[in-house]
Amino acid sequence: MRADARPRSSGPAMSPNFRRRRSRRRRPKTPNTRPEQNSHRRTPRMTKQWTIDGLNCAGMNREQMEKTLKGNVHAINYTSIRPYASLTDSLLLLEKVRATIEEMDDVAFVATTVADIERAAETNRVGVILGTQDSTMIEPETGLLATLKQLGIRILQPNYNRPNHYGCGAPQTGPADTGMTEAGAEWLEEMHRLRLVADISHCGHKTTSDFIAASKGRPLVISHANSYEVCPSPRNKTDEHIRGVAETGGLIGGVMWTPAVRHDQRPDMDDFVNHIDRLVKFAGIDHVGFSSDTVESPRPDPEVWDKSFGPNGPDQNIVGVLGDWFVYENRLNLGFQSQVDTPKVWDGLAKRGYSEGDIEKIMRKNWLRVLKDIWGE
């Protein structure tokens, strides 16, 4: 889904000093001069049940980052550039997002390494991984991927829902999906060379298969998609895709986006976990992650949603086949309506019988491993 950055001013100025707890023996007060602890006002802590959200396109503002932290989410793959944007608009959007994050560095910062993500959890902040759901802005100049990396981008998809220079999107089904192009193969090689995460979530089925085959065992991710056999949306992936992306060493992130969970009625947490079961069956527990893909904003606009993502949206073979339940008020999963609800995913997996260790893999550890493998730390 798309996300427009909405910069918002940061909160009140913070004091650089922290008040230390006293032990039974009084000690002289010593100012804390460690730069890492003085760079933000939030109390450092490590939460065991913290989550990495593999695709997040909520508003980028302080209120949303506070919600994200309430859900114990400490890293997000953030859609920092909207799909189909021109190169100029993409650079402007990216600059706005980066500036907004810098203004609220007490709650969030740009993460470019696994160490950054772990530091975000340790210091109770959100590590924002800058990503895009589209590479149209650089076509056909694949060499510009290096420039995007210099600007902080770490995850890219070759295409969104429309066909482009690199391949076809999910709405193109059957003969309309002509697969990965020669330029798409060049894009993939450059992504691997630069150690950027190649995400094929929005690719059509043939295009998905082509990218998996061309990756030659080097990790790919499907950051946000579910099982086509459980819910036959063009946005979901077949058992073959699920197995194939796992064989590259990558992962597939089960997604909360309701049109990819269930068609006939508004889905709940059990419906989402049904997809996780299928993903685990064909990918293995070490190759499944979590993604919210939830458009959450303090300034919702039902009319914009309806025309962009709702039943009157452009991709009718994805959203037009849903039941009458799919209206703005019911757009979110009954069990997950905000980042604050992320602990409910942990609970839903535990209720289904997943062990604590396996839940940690799905909600965090698999993402950490794959990102480390690709980024080369």
Image (tube, rainbow, N blue to C red):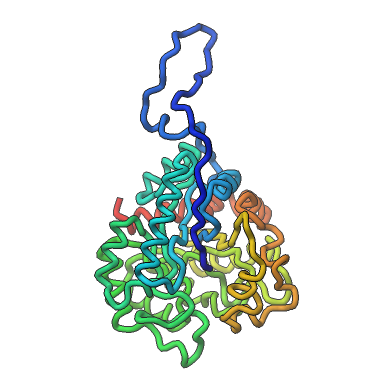
Corner quadrant of residue 324? bottom right
Q: Position of residue 136 (x, y in %)?
A: 38, 75
In this rendering, is residue 147 above or below 316?
Answer: above
Q: Position of residue 122 (x, y in %)?
A: 46, 37
Q: Can residue 30 be seen in this view?
A: yes
Looking at the rendered structure, the number of numbered marks drawn on it comes to: 0
In this rendering, is residue 313 above or below 25?
Answer: below
Corner quadrant of residue 143? bottom left
Q: Would residue 271 be found to the left or right of residue 203 on screen?
A: right
* Residue at figure coordinates x 42%, y 65% from the top left: 132
Q: Position of residue 64 (x, y in %)?
A: 57, 50
* Residue at figure coordinates x 36%, y 51% from the top left: 112
Q: Would residue 57 be found to the left or right of residue 94 on screen?
A: right
* Residue at figure coordinates x 56%, y 70% from the top left: 226
Q: Position of residue 234 (x, y in %)?
A: 55, 80
Q: Which of 369 and 82 is in front in this view?
A: 82
* Residue at figure coordinates x 66%, y 55% from the top left: 348
